[in-house]
Amino acid sequence: MKKYVIVGLGIAGLTAAKTIRSLDSGSEISIYTDEQTLFYPKPKLFDLIYETLSAKDIYYYDSFWYDTNRIRLHLGTGIRKIDSIEHKLLTEDGGTVNYDSLLIANGASCFVPSFEGTYTPGVFTLRNLSDAFAIRRHSRLIGNHKPVVVIGGGVLGLEAAHSFMKNKLRPTVIEYNSYLLPRQIDKEGADVLRGIFENWGIEIKTDSSTERITGEKNVDKVILSNGTMLPAEMVLISSGVRSNVDLLERSKLPYKKGALVDDNLTVTEDVYAAGDIAEHNGNVYGIIPPAIEQATIAAKNMIKPGTAIYHGSMPTNTLKIAGFNFTSIGLVNLIEDDPQYEIIRAKAPIDGKYRKIVLKDGKVQGIIILGLKGEAIAANKLVNTHADVSQYKERLKDIAFSLKETRT
């Protein structure tokens, strides 16, 4: 009987365990995680900030499901070192674990910049349940209508700002770049997005960087590099994540930004990686769809090495809050005057709607959609199949024309 061991119980670890069990009903599956909780979808953390929910309310499966599927959980048991020669793990509490095939899926941690004041009481990051509960407690402690600063105008920072607004706080978002979501959207779309958030009462400051955070018993100000002082009774740092490479370093396994994997998602013999820890062809995706795709492929190769190939993932980002939808798929940011590509835009800023389609020889390479309900599935299909929409070019300039009306 083969022994599969998974390090990490995020979406990659869970997906791999489910895939292995579906293809190998008899072998042993064990998951080790330094968290004390069952798997929960990380987007649900934002619900915990402003809703009266418990951890159990956001668990994807209960303990019975893991028992039924014969998946052994070792909660609160971190892994100190991997001995890939002897096929053994050393746990943080000094125990040893043997494996036949190992998946590293220990994810990433929040990146905290080096400016002064990041350890001031009232300054938080958001990555796990304990973070969410700590933020919720502090939100209630400071009371309604108090100023909150979110450092970072990416997807997670914007979702957090919206959660704070729903919690009757007054959020300000600081973004270093000249517009929001610079990796997922262009400036025209970002201007529409900014208008939506400002209409919700969320202040946005772009072209801004943090000099320091001040306060003694609690944070009181965020001081920007240009000297602007922002009052703040709570600060959330949302400046991206970094792969948890410490385990790789201690184990002398190859890594750069993340664990270096080949097209089978192999790190070294009988050791695989997936999710936020995996670096494939220079890419660490840091989003859910590639983590699921990688974990599925890695699991198949754990069962029978070399049977599944990973070709990389299509970058996909979504933001869905208060009935507002944003999706960015594929190649969306490029040099505007590149003659290889044609860009078709349509927008209705007052209604918070925007669409950008990137074409090459008439075929779809990327799509941004803002405020357009029910379009994400069609957009995914058009990008993933590189559909030829040449016959629809004129109609696509009209924001009222739905992507679902294309026939490719």
Image (cartoon, rainbow, N blue to C red):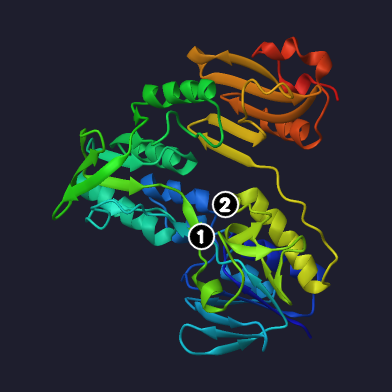
Q: Residue furthest left?
A: 216
Numbered disc 1: secondary structure: strand
Numbered disc 2: secondary structure: loop
Q: Nearer the viewer, residue 145 or 115?
A: 115
Residue drawn at 38 percent across, 50 percent down: 52
Which quadrant of the rendered structure holds the N terminus?
A: bottom right
- Above or below for 94 versus 117: below
> In the rendered view, does 352 fall on the left or right side of 54?
right
Mark number displayed over residue 286: 2
Is the C-beta separation of discs 1 and 2 under 8 Å? yes
Residue drawn at 64 percent across, 20 percent down: 337
> In the rendered view, does 377 fall on the left or right side of 39?
right
Q: Which residue is mark 1?
A: 108
Q: Position of residue 296 (x, y in %)?
A: 74, 60
Question: Distance between the Cα atoms at labels 1 and 2?
Answer: 8 Å
Closer to the N terminus: mark 1 or mark 2? 1
Residue drawn at 65 percent across, 55 percent down: 291
Q: The disc labelled 2 sits on which kind of residue?
A: Gly
Mark number displayed over residue 241: none
Q: Position of residue 199 (x, y in %)?
A: 38, 21
Which quadrant of the rendered structure holds the C terminus?
A: top right
Q: Position of residue 233 (x, y in %)?
A: 21, 44
Q: Nearer the viewer, residue 358 or 232?
A: 358
